[in-house]
Image (tube, rainbow, N blue to C red):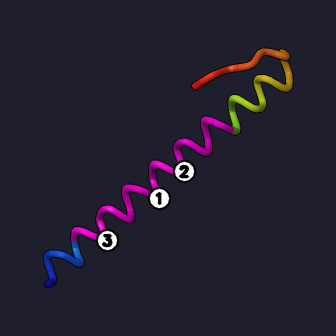
């Protein structure tokens, strides 16, 4: 059981990291679109 909970915690941390990275990319893309009026698709 300990191994399963460890794996779940690790997956949760990875998911948070991915969400944070995607969020930063979206913020940057939105910022660039706003300034240059260019639509970026990531």
Q: Which residue is mark 1?
A: 16
- As for residue 10 lying within the magenta part, the answer is yes
At horizontal 85% and vertical 22% (from top left) the residue drawn is 35
Spatial separation of the CA atoms under disc 3 and disc 1: 11 Å
At horizontal 29% and vertical 65% (from top left) the residue drawn is 10
| Circle 1: element type | helix
Res. 14 image quadrant? bottom left
Q: Return the disc, 3 or 1, that comes first in the chain's sequence.
A: 3
- In this rendering, the count of numbered labels is 3
Q: Quadrant of the image for the N terminus?
A: bottom left
Q: Nearer the viewer, residue 28 or 5?
A: 5
Is the residue under label 2 in contact with that under label 1 (CB below 8 Å)? yes
**Residue 20, horizontal then vertical, whole percent:** 54, 50
| Circle 2: element type | helix
The dominant secondary structure in magenta is helix
Res. 29 image quadrant? top right
At horizontal 85% and vertical 26% (from top left) the residue drawn is 34
Q: Which residue is mark 3?
A: 9
**Residue 21, horizontal then vertical, whole percent:** 52, 44
Q: Residues within 10 Å of mark 2 (few under 14, many from 20)?
A: few
Q: Which residue is mark 2?
A: 20
């Amino acid at each position: 059981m300990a191994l399963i909970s460890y794996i779940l915690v690790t997956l949760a941390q990875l998911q948070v990291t991915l969400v944070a990275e995607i969020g930063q990319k979206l913020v940057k893309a939105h910022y660039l679109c706003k300034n240059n009026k260019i639509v970026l698709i990531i």
